[in-house]
Image (cartoon, rainbow, N blue to C red):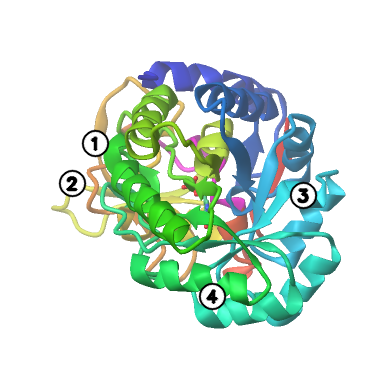
Amino acid sequence: MPTIDLVQQSHQKIFDYLANHRLPTPCLVMDLEEVGRNFQALRSAFPQSHIYYAVKANPAQQLLNLLVSLDARFDAASIPEIQACLESGAKPHQISFGNTIKKAKDIAIAYELGIRLFAFDSLQELEKLSRFAPGAQVYCRLLMECSGAEWPLSRKFGCEIEMAKDLLICSLNMGLQPYGISFHVGSQQMDVSQWDRAIGSTAQLFQELLAAGIELQMVNMGGGFPGQYRSAVPAVTSYAEAIQASLDRHFGDSQPITMLEPGRSLVADAGVINTEVVLISQKSYTEDRRWVFLDIGKFSGLVETMDEAIKYRIRTPWDGQGYGPVILAGPTCDSADILYDQSDYRLPLNLQPGDQVQILSTGAYTSTYSSVGFNGFAPLAVYCI
Ligand SMILES: *Cc1c(COP(=O)(O)O)cnc(C)c1O
């Protein structure tokens, strides 16, 4: 299990960079070497799987360039994401159009660009695919519960197994190639056993379809691998062992082709947001909790603090000295712009306005979630080093 110290160490390059460059705050600094290391670690843990980076986690062009150079593949959700991958040098056959909700026009453009691998979870989507992406490989996403995940991706995506079976049979009759099954067990999934049930259902579907004359080939096991936030997380090798054991148990000797779609685990720990304390105040003479306002908030990239789901670690110039409880909030004139109120955050009592504090492991789902200028605050600047 990676200790928190190890991850701190891996941030050292960014801390040094911040110390030597006076970048305006707030900004996100990405350590590309760390992204490379994370990718290689995942690849060696899952040597049989094709790794499709989920572009939405962080689409910085330099980062995509790096992943192309490492022979990664890409899970894209829109035409601009597909184009960003192609511009970085990815080949169309390395890109999966993994969104189950696509405009017909975008399917046609993707097909024109050479994309031949598409996700779906409904009959209507299949009808669009059969018309605008004839002959393409398609995979059906299964509905998941996502328990154990800190950022669930449930309900909205996927269909139930009986429907998946019918749709895959339909897809053949519609001139498409039924290629496989996908599922996502939820993002920041802390429980390595959560893949087992999905792999079991998938194996059963493979058999039922075989009986119907359709030989599926591929299982897309999604993302869900964690970043290092406040609680310790299992090592990537623990996920790999549990998942491989499930594949062995449910598929035996006829192992399918497998895809993974990691987003968070490749980039989260490779990023640090540098921010400045704007104000520290109290609302009464009796309350001992301080309000600490940063120059970044929910609208400038920290959307995953919604319901305090993702709990980032914070570094200050006064770490190790006396701490007191705080409510941490962003700078905008919206009362939803509170980061942590219920999660027992404590910061040093010496903290002052003007101090720079770092929000750790923020390389995933921050720059892309940043609004274009709510209240006049600029989108989050990104530096790749
Ligand atoms: C967002 C997303 C991912 C990435 O998930 P992580 O939990 O960040 O690894 C993978 N696949 C699909 C379809 C997604 O929407």
Tally of marks: 4
Is residue 31 depicted above or below 302 in this figure? Answer: above
Distance from disc 3 to disc 1, alpha carbons, whole Å, reads 53 Å
How packed is label 4: few (under 14 Cα within 10 Å), some, or many (20 or more)? some
Residue 118 position, x and y percent, is 64, 62
In this view, the mark in front (3 or 1): 3
Q: Earlier in the sequence, mark 1 or mark 2?
A: 2
Circle 4/circle 2 CB separation < 8 Å: no
Magenta residues, start to end: 350-367
Residue for badge 2: 288
Distance from disc 1 to disc 4, alpha carbons, whole Å, reads 61 Å
Q: Amino acid at mark 4?
A: Cys
Which residue sits at x=39%, y=59%?
208
Q: Earlier in the sequence, mark 3 or mark 1?
A: 3
Snapshot quadrant of residue 345? top left
Asked if residue 293 lies left or right of residue 88, the reply is left
Distance from disc 4 to disc 3, alpha carbons, whole Å, reads 24 Å
Q: Amino acid at mark 1?
A: Gly
Residue for badge 3: 93
Q: Earlier in the sequence, mark 4 or mark 2?
A: 4
Q: Amino acid at mark 3?
A: His
In this view, the mark in front (2 or 3): 3
Asked if residue 54 lies left or right of residue 151, the reply is right
Residue 172 position, x and y percent, is 60, 70
Distance from disc 4 to disc 2, alpha carbons, whole Å, reads 63 Å
Q: Earlier in the sequence, mark 1 or mark 4?
A: 4
Circle 3/circle 1 CB separation < 8 Å: no
In this view, the mark in front (1 or 4): 4
Q: Amino acid at mark 2?
A: Asp
Residue nearer the viewer, 329 or 35: 35
Residue 328 position, x and y percent, is 35, 50
